[in-house]
Image (cartoon, rainbow, N blue to C red):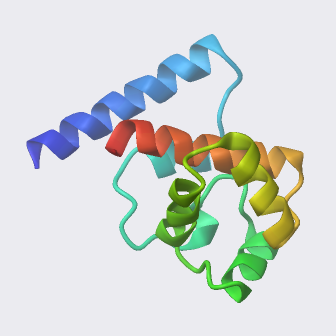
């Protein structure tokens, strides 16, 4: 438990440093990467709103961890993941970037 709390604290610090040094991330992104994924719905991912979430659910990607599985199957490759997201649910460039960044940062903190 202490390790998880420490990891979450470090992740929040990382988000703060990223926000200060680079472009800011959304509140949704910050909340997602600040804690273990658990059973979060796919729409908890940054860049995934109701419309894209519904399309992903129709393809069997109903939970964030299912999308994480695809992200890992694609070996965390940005181009492959973004292309998959575009082809699967029609995500635009910003949505692709936000979702990829969210999952990458979550993996850096928790895997």
As displayed, is residue 107 above or below residue 13? below
Taking depth in this image into account, of 81 and 34 the one nearest to the observer is 81
Based on the displayed image, in which of its 4 quarters is residue 90 positioned?
Answer: bottom right
Residue sitting at x 50%, y 17%: 17
Question: Looking at the image, which residue is at 74% across and 81% down?
Answer: 54
Q: Say left or right for 3 vs 45.
A: left
| Residue occupying image coordinates x 65% and y 46% | 100
Residue 80, above or below 16: below
At which x and y percent is residue 101? Answer: 63, 40
User: Please, is residue 27 above or below residue 9 in the view?
Assistant: below
Q: Residue at x 69, y 41 (%)?
A: 78
* 23 relative to 108 in the view: left or right: right
Q: Where is residue 44 shown, x and y percent of the image?
A: 57, 63
Q: Residue furthest left?
A: 2
Residue 67: x percent and y percent? 57, 66
Q: Nearer the viewer, residue 98 or 74?
A: 74
């Amino acid at each position: 438990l202490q390790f998880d709390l420490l990891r979450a604290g470090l992740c929040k610090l990382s988000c703060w440093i990223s926000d200060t040094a680079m472009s800011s991330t959304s509140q949704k992104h910050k909340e997602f990467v600040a804690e273990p994924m658990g059973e979060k719905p796919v729409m908890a991912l940054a860049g995934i709103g109701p419309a894209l979430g519904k399309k992903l659910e129709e393809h069997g990607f109903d939970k964030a961890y299912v999308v994480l599985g695809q992200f890992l199957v694609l070996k965390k490759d940005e181009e492959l993941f973004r292309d998959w997201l575009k082809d699967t649910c029609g995500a635009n460039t910003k949505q692709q970037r936000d979702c990829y960044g969210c999952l990458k940062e979550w993996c850096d903190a928790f895997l």
